[in-house]
Each structure stands twice: as structure tokens, then as C-alpha cells.
Amino acid sequence: ACGFAEYSAGAITQMAGRAGHGGTENKQGSGNINSIDQGVLESYLIPRIVEHLNAEVVLGTINSVESALQWIRTSFFFVRLPRNPLRYGASAQLTTNSAMDFAKSLCLTHLGRLLKEGFIVIEQDKNNVNTDQVGEQKQSSQQLNESSLIRSTAHGAAMSKYYICFETMCLFSSITPFADLKEMLEITARAKEFEEFHIRMGEKKKLNLLNKEKQIRFPIKGKIRLPENKISLLVQAALGHVAMDDWQMKQESTSVLLNLQRILSCLADFALETKQFYAARTALILQRSAQQRMWENVEQTNQQVKINQQKGLEIRENENDSNEGNANNQDSNSQCLVLEQIEGIGPVFSSLLASRAGITSLDALANADPSLIEAVLHRNSPFGATLIRRAASVPRFDLSVSQRVTDDPNIVVVTVAVHRKNIQQFNQQQQQQQQYQSHQQNQIKDQPTQVDSCNIRLFVGNSKNEIIFSHRFNSRYVGGNGIFIHCGAHAKIIVREYRFVE
């Protein structure tokens, strides 16, 4: 009546790719996939129900406790609850009414958790609700009842947008307003998303040796004992390009960096919403480092490592003269890591360009001789010209700030202008891209480099660590004269009037 029908055993084995393969069929002619019939499929909604409730509140599906009950009644969990109540924490003698009461208590409990942490808010008056005041959002769960109207806050929307676990979002509130890279890395390493990365047997020795590497920017004090220590080392090893022989640790570092980018993006939005300038800046720096798989400023990182060595702050054991002699080679290798951002340049090419041609920066690569690059890398023309064009097309910006005093001595107007230095290369790429698209039917083989652009997040803070302005736009709207074009309008970025309070 509902229009659904069971798949046959032959159809299942065909979809699994095992039909007709010897040794994979039993006497009845069905594949080993039928072994799933020995168990019963159960719901896994309960372990992550708080995240699902938050997502539905953000979407608008749930706007009250009553709508939350209607939503949970349509879930597979509610189908399995009366048939296997003990698995979901309910009593064995579960009736239809008691199942509704159990589902209601679940909704009230987890919506109360979201309300307590400020991810949802009770909507008393639509016109008088201020989502920027986080302290007012953290209301007591006792105020939540069946008639309460609820809606999401900016923090709850960020949690749903980046698929962040509830426990991880609660960690964000423990970050200090002036958090540095070390504190940011330590807190994000304790995220719920990393709970599956355990320290395996025989891995502590490898991690302790990894902790002594020169490229580890923030070494762990003492022995490696906790999973968050492993996460921190894997991130630092990846950003410092430390060679790891264990292929499992290499795979884990790749997965950790992918999750870390998502967590830090949410953390940056969290800090921007709470108006914490330094925390937002640090989160964005670490997020960009994880995305590019290298530290933000390699030269400053090397200088910090040398300072730590002089002060004896690094945790090093059994250091000898040979290790100290290799420090210069490691520093020279790390200085050319910035070149690996260019397509076509890997670890080998970046080392050759640094050691044989003295090219250790994007500006040096953009101004280099194409024939020199091709001779050093043993490549044919036009490989050198292509690398130079790609290096020159990377967006480069200048930021200028000016202020103007008004008639009111307590008010000053601050103007922030973003200039693109290589605007000529950007315009040339746009013209080449348009010409290529117009002549695409002629099958031109020499496709021009795609126009490089990036998303820019500009925010301004004051001496009190408060964000007074925040704006996000794309680099293709930024011109060379300090203005940016958005929706056809030409205007400078003008920070709103800010009154200084003594």
C-alpha cells in the first residue's frame, strides 16, 4: 500500500558486486551479505541527538517542544523504541503513552542543554531578542516547558553549519580572550571529533621521538600519555613537514587536519560573535595554516625555535653535536615550504629552488628567470614561465588605516582600505580567461591560468580586544586603488563610528 517492496537476495548480491563470484555464495544462492539478517538494525540517534535537535532548530523544523515531539515521532528511533526499549534506556514495560513520555523527556533534556550553553534561546518577544548578548542566551533549562517557543542563536547556527559536536562547542567557551597558537592548538586537540584517534600499542615511543624533532613548534612537556598530545604532535608534524615512517600516523594526520580546518572555522565564527579579536585572529591563522599544511610565518617560526633552544625551553633529550649541526639544514628546508603552495612545486622542487637558485619566497619566484628555473629543475619550456605566472597571480594585499576626528572629541571615524598590489596580473588573467572561453570551440591547448581569488575576512579590533567591525568579501572585488566593488557600488570600507569609553 505504501509503494515499497523488499529487494530480492539476487539484487542485493548484485549491488554488492559479489554475484557469481566463487566462494561468496551459500547453498541457497545468496551472498554473504545475508549475514546482516542475523541481527536487527537499530537506531543510533540517541548518542548524537543534541546535534540533530540543534540542526532542526536552525532549519526551522523545530520551534517548540511540541514540534520537537512531532519530529522525533517521525524518526526511526521512535519505531524501534517500543520494540527494544532497554537498548535506549527505557523501561522494559514500555507502552505507547510511556514511549511518548520518554521521548518528551529526551527532548526537554537535550533542548535544555542547548539552552544552557546559549545555542538556542526562548523567544519571548521577537522584536526584543538580542542574539549578540551571549550571557542573556544562557538561560536555565527549568524555564523550558511545552509552551516555550525556541529559536537558534548565531552559535547554534555555526554548530550546525560546520557539523561540530556539542562537547566541542562547549570547549570554545574555555578559550581565553588573548589565546595564542599554543593554547588554541591545545584546546582544539581535545575536540570530540578526535576521540577515535587513540594511542596504539607501541606508538608512544614513536610519539616521544617525534616530540624531540626540531620542527615541532610547541613540544609537549614530559612523556606522551594522552590522546590530545598525539593530536597536537600530528598537527605540528604536518605543518612542520616532519618525515614520518609510520603510514598509519600519516593517514591519521591527514584526517586530523581536515577535521581541524572545520573546527577552527567554527571557532573563528564563535570568537567573532563574542567580539574577541585576538581569539578570532589566532583561530583564523591556525585554520589557514592547517589548510595550506604549513605554519603561517615560517621565518618567525624558525626564529622562535632558535630562541627556545637558547633559553632551554624545548624538551630535548640526548642532544649531541650532530643534531645541532643539522639545525641549519632543517631551517633552510623549512624556509622553502612556502613555494609548495604553487601548483607544480613539491618538496623536491622547493628544495632545489632554495638550494641551487636561492628562491625561497613567492616574490623571488615571481621575479626569477624562467630559464634558470627550468635549468635547476631539469624541465622544458614553458614550465618556468608557468610557475612564474602562477606565483605572480597569488593575491597580494596592502592594508591602510586612517582616522578622522569629528566635532565630537569622543568620536573618531576610522577608514580601512584594502589594496591589491598585483592588480595588473589579475586583470591580465581575467582577459586571458575571457579570451579562452570565447575561443574554446577551437580547442586551444594552451589554457591560461585560472584567475586566482580568495575570500577575505576583515575585522578591526581596539585595545580592549573588542571587535568593532567585521566584513567578508572576495578578493576579485578588491581594486588597486583601495576600493572594492560589491553589487556594482564603489565605496571604501568605512568603520562605523565608535565612541571611546574611559
Image: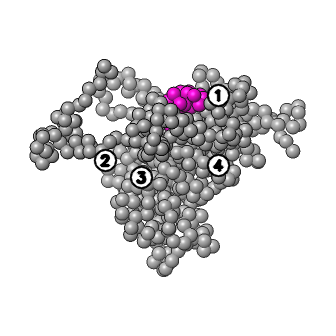
Q: Is residue 409 above or below residue 279?
A: above
Kindly report the distance in space between the C-alpha atoms of the residues bearing marks 2 and 3.
33 Å
Are the residues at dot 1 and dot 2 in contact (C-beta closer than 8 Å)?
Answer: no
What span is in magenta?
A: 51-71
Which amino acid type corresponds to the residue marked 2 in the rendered image? Asn
Q: Residue at x 29, y 24 (%)?
A: 4
Q: Quadrant of the C terminus?
A: top right
Camera-side residue: 199 or 469? 199
Q: Amino acid at mark 4?
A: Ser
Q: Give whichever of discs 3 and 4 has the lower sequence position.
A: 4
Choose the circle earlier in sequence order: 3 or 1: 1
Q: CA distance from mark 3 to mark 4?
A: 27 Å
Question: Tag 2 or tag 1, which sits nearer the N-term?
Answer: 1
Where is mark 4, residue-wise? 173
Tag 2 near tag 3, CB within 8 Å: no
Q: Which residue is mark 1?
A: 147
Q: Position of residue 158 (x, y in %)?
A: 57, 38
**Total tally of numbered discs in the picture:** 4
Choose between 141 and 311: the one closer to the eye.
141
- The residue carrying mark 2 is 380
